[in-house]
Amino acid sequence: MGIKTCNYTKVEEFILLGLTKCPDMQTVLFLVFLFSYFTSLMGNVLIIFVSSVIPRLHTPMYFFLSNLSFLDIWYTSIIVPKMLINFLSLKKSISFDVCFTQMVVHMCLGGTECYLLLAMAYDRYVAICSPLHYTTIMHPSLCIKMASGCWIGGGINAFINTLFVLRLSFFGPNVINHFFCEIPSVIELSCTDASLNKTILFLCAMFVVMVPFFLILITYGYIISSILRISTSMGRKKAFSTCASHIIVVTLFYGTIIFMYMRPGDTHVANQDKMATLFYSVVTPMLNPFIYTLRNKDVKGVLLELTQKSMCKNGNSN
């Protein structure tokens, strides 16, 4: 293992190596991620909009989906704009304060999403396993408490890791082999022994990532068991369709975040880590609106109605 060379000048900024060193790819990647960012923003804003203005979508499922879309907007916004700037910059730097903010907000949002996906799984469990008591159990106050608990849980995760990062000293090197300030890449640059931070990070990942993931698996065990007991194939298909979108999102998100945070430290490879992080923090937030709208008859119906009303208004005005 190499020995770090540290001087006595405090790091004022970090250099992000990004996704590639090839100059010819910078413009291409800029256009690709600019498109994906605006697609993500428009898709998630659209879900929040239709969930807010359409009365029949004022249900627990769309309440949690709106929270997920709001979270995804910030998830991409804390990362992608700086990526876009660096694609076109010769000096791909980020100030220490902005880097630290990126790291803290990313940890908070990542933890919140883990808990939020668990809350959405519980909503589907009640809807399928106790349909007659659904409105009684999933009343608005409970939904608000569950969503608040998700955000608080994410905040606690960020607070604990931030507390231990503050004990570290950064006096060089300052080159991060990543496209943003993700905590494992940042603590590797510390001149202080970061073994405690890595242990804390792993333990937090166990509680924030693995515990919700296993609870989701248990929840879907009960859901699948209930679906199989439905007598008609049409009923089974309808019940499964209500949670299919959530299953896809859970698979995409947890598959990559577990790969990123639940491996031993000595098995991490920079390029693999960047691809995994890119998928769960940039690609998945862009895909979520499509997954939910393309597989959801309610949302597609609402979008069709809004499109028809818009066309009618334009026709009447002409």
Image (tube, grey):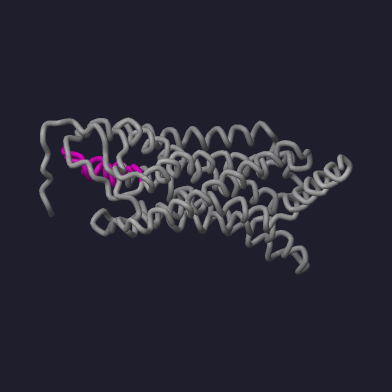
Give the side of residue 66 with respect to residue 261, left or right: right
> In which image quadrant can residue 156 be found?
top left
Q: Residue furthest front?
A: 318
* Residue depicted at 58% across the width and 57% down the height: 247
Residue nearest the observer in this picture, 276 or 167: 276
Quadrant (top left, top right, bottom left, bottom right) of the N terminus: bottom left
In the image, residue 32 lies at what x, y percent?
Answer: 48, 55
Q: Is residue 194 magenta?
A: yes
Residue nearest the observer in this picture, 182 or 166: 182
Q: Is residue 139 magenta?
A: no
Quadrant (top left, top right, bottom left, bottom right) of the C terminus: top right
Give the side of residue 173 with respect to residue 113, left or right: left
* Residue depicted at 38% across the width and 54% down the height: 26
Mark yes or no: residue 257 visible. Answer: no
* Magenta residues, start to end: 180-200
> In which image quadrant can residue 147 be found?
top right
* Residue depicted at 18% across the width and 31% down the height: 10
**Rendered view: 67 above or below 40:** above
* Residue depicted at 83% across the width and 44% down the height: 309
Give the side of residue 242 with respect to residue 117, left or right: right
In the image, residue 7 lies at what x, y percent?
Answer: 10, 36
In the image, residue 216 lies at what x, y percent?
Answer: 53, 52
Mark yes or no: residue 66 visible. Answer: yes
Number of numbered discs visible in the structure rendering: 0
> In which image quadrant can residue 223 be found?
bottom right
Q: Residue furthest right?
A: 316
**Rendered view: 134 above or below 268:** above
In the image, residue 301 lies at what x, y percent?
Answer: 78, 52
Residue nearest the observer in this picture, 302 or 32: 32
Give the side of residue 146 with respect to residue 86, left or right: right
